Amino acid sequence: MYYKPFVQFFIGKRSYMELKPEKSVPARHDHQNCIDTALQEAERVLEDKGARMTGIRRLVLQYIWRNHCAVKAYDILGFLGDRKGSAKPPTVYRALQFLQDHGLVHRLESLNAYIGCPYPAENHNGQFLICNDCGTVKEFTTPEILRAVDIAADTQGFEVSHQTHEVLGRCQDCREQGNGLD
Amino acid sequence: MYYKPFVQFFIGKRSYMELKPEKSVPARHDHQNCIDTALQEAERVLEDKGARMTGIRRLVLQYIWRNHCAVKAYDILGFLGDRKGSAKPPTVYRALQFLQDHGLVHRLESLNAYIGCPYPAENHNGQFLICNDCGTVKEFTTPEILRAVDIAADTQGFEVSHQTHEVLGRCQDCREQGNGLD
DNA sequence: AGAATTGTGTTATGTTATAACATATCGCTG
DNA sequence: CAGCGATATGTTATAACATAACACAATTCT
């Protein structure tokens, strides 16, 4: 039995299919557009909720969107330090918490790192393909998985509040380039 | 369209369905049996691989199996300290690494904690229902999810090496008891 | 018994994250 | 526009999680 796959991939605001990448993603698209779009989206989402996009939060979000790799809290801290003189951990963690609360970034539990969300308006739990070689992260979602989790939870009388689903491995580009040992 | 759910739940070595729990799981079954079975399984698995079950590793595994909640590394450290005089972090982390390498425990990334695996013989990535109230963790697996991930990865030319899938929420027992606010 | 491998002890430090309280800024309302 | 409450940021300190590096001990193989 064959299931027609229904899978959406998100990289910035466009579907992955349009890109047909051969090299690492950041090099293959107008990434400034990703950044701009993400920031505009963010402003809009926050506006709608009556939440504030402050200077620090904007800087953090920009830094997170500088490419499609996950970002560490202490790297953000260093970045802020460069810009704002002195920044301490709570500054970063507070900004991250805020951005997460509003769906603008996801935390990748298996990396202790953070990635921008291309679909902040839709409240969701992300699922991620994470390349161990180049660090590129792609968010995706499939109805099959969501439904399967619902079934499993329902069967147990389990009420889902949050989930994290992270798939680690090697992306196509890195496989083709023969990074690592293959 | 209705899909007959095919979901297996693991609690110790028996299917969840047999148990029909009303209270928290550890109180509702012969947990000593879980521990004994898990330890015997572990000895057997390691034997088959020519790996050694040492005193420390056994203690750590026993402690992890003391109930169906995830265990923190530094709690294990305290436990070892009680038994062995002085134990330092590397002792615990080395034991955990070994047990993970041999499929005897899973790490729960969203909790920074560890849980015993009821199916160490089968190499797999676990999926987990984690109760935020009582801490009980249930491993489960559904073919639908595995297949959906395979499709998503294949579509991308992504080679999967490992995945983590953790579902947080509230278990049936806690919902019925009205723990928290409901 | 001796060599090689594997496991453990120990010191030190690296990395990730939060508590607690002080100060500043924003946005409203009178 | 002053004053107030709410929100945001600054600051100090420390908690929580994890590993590097090297010394020593135990096991196992020959």
Image (tube, coloured by chain):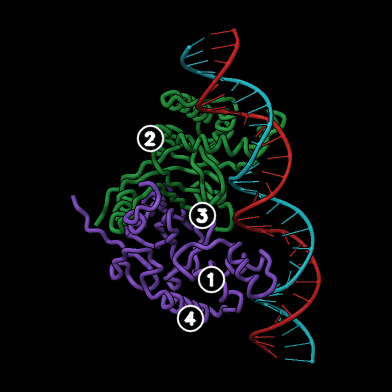
Chain colours: A green, B purple, C cyan, D red
What residue is shown at x 64% (from left), y 72% (from top)? Answer: B82
**D7 lies above or below A24:** above
Amino acid carrying label 3: it is Leu
Which callout, 1 or 4, points at the residue further toward the start of the chain?
4
Q: Which residue is mark 2?
A: A122
Residue under the image location 43 percent in, 33 percent down: A120
Both marks 2 and 1 on one chain? no
In the shown orientation, is residue A42 left or right of residue B90?
Answer: left
Q: Which residue is mark 4?
A: B44
The image's mark for residue B111 is 3
Task: Determine which quarter of the picture holds residue B142.
Answer: bottom left
Tag 4: amino acid: Arg
- Mark number for residue B63? 1
Q: Is residue A124 left or right of residue A69?
A: left
Q: Are marks 2 and 3 on the same chain?
A: no
Observer-side mark, 2 or 1, equals: 1
